[in-house]
Amino acid sequence: MREALAQARQALEEGEVPVGAAIVLDGRTIALAHNERERTQDPTAHAEVLALRRAAKALGSRRLTGCALYATLEPCPMCAGAAALAGVSEVIFGAYDPRAGCAGSVYVLPEDPAFGADAACTGGVLEDECTALLAEFFGARRARP
């Protein structure tokens, strides 16, 4: 999660919503990413999706069985769905998203067998640090005239 947090800090410096992600296989980080939606003007450039793409490329396979997805914010429906379709074994996140989170808050898509998914979801890992980055970003945006 610390590597995902470093990615989130980088996103914050770039003016992106500070979300970072890491893909880990056998204790080794194989992909890192942070939100790039503003820079790329790509609505799908969420940290988790970018990390999943990079991990698939690194492994030479779309199947990420045995991999864990770490994200600083609970994955949204798109990202949770991408994790399920990639076949990750675990989704671990920091801050909960009670509005749109789909790994525990609103829904638990990566554990839903209807999607062929069985990834265990764990939230609240380094939650205070993850939440603080988001609060810093959104607090600064609200403070602007």
Image (spheres, grey):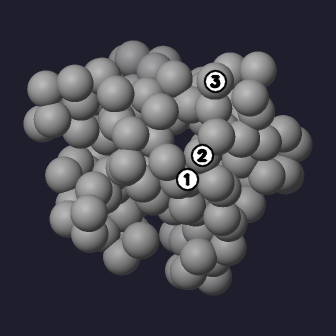
Type of residue at label 2? Ala
**Mark 1 Cα shell of 10 Å, populated few (<14), some (14-19), many (≥20):** many
- Which residue is labeled 1 in the image? 91
Q: Residue at x 30, y 22 (%)?
A: 62
Quadrant location of residue 139? bottom right
In the figure, 71 relative to 119: above or below? below
Check contact, mark 1 vs mark 2: CB within 8 A.
Answer: yes
- Mark 3 secondary-structure assignment: loop
Type of residue at label 3? Gly
**Mark 2 Cα shell of 10 Å, populated few (<14), some (14-19), many (≥20):** many
Q: Residue at x 63, y 32 (%)?
A: 117
Check contact, mark 2 vs mark 3: CB within 8 A.
Answer: no
Q: Quadrant of the N terminus?
A: bottom left
C-alpha gap between disc 2 and disc 3: 10 Å
How many discs appear? 3
The label nearer to you, 3 versus 1, is 3
- Mark 1 secondary-structure assignment: strand
C-alpha gap between disc 1 and disc 2: 6 Å
Type of residue at label 1? Val
- Which residue is labeled 3 in the image? 116
**Mark 3 Cα shell of 10 Å, populated few (<14), some (14-19), many (≥20):** few
Check contact, mark 3 vs mark 1: CB within 8 A.
Answer: no
Q: Residue at x 42, y 54 (%)?
A: 68
- Which residue is labeled 2 in the image? 119
- In depth, the one of 58 and 16 nearer the eye is 58
- Mark 2 secondary-structure assignment: loop
Compare marks 1 and 2 and give the one earlier in the sequence: 1
Residue 92's spot in the image, x, y percent?
A: 55, 61
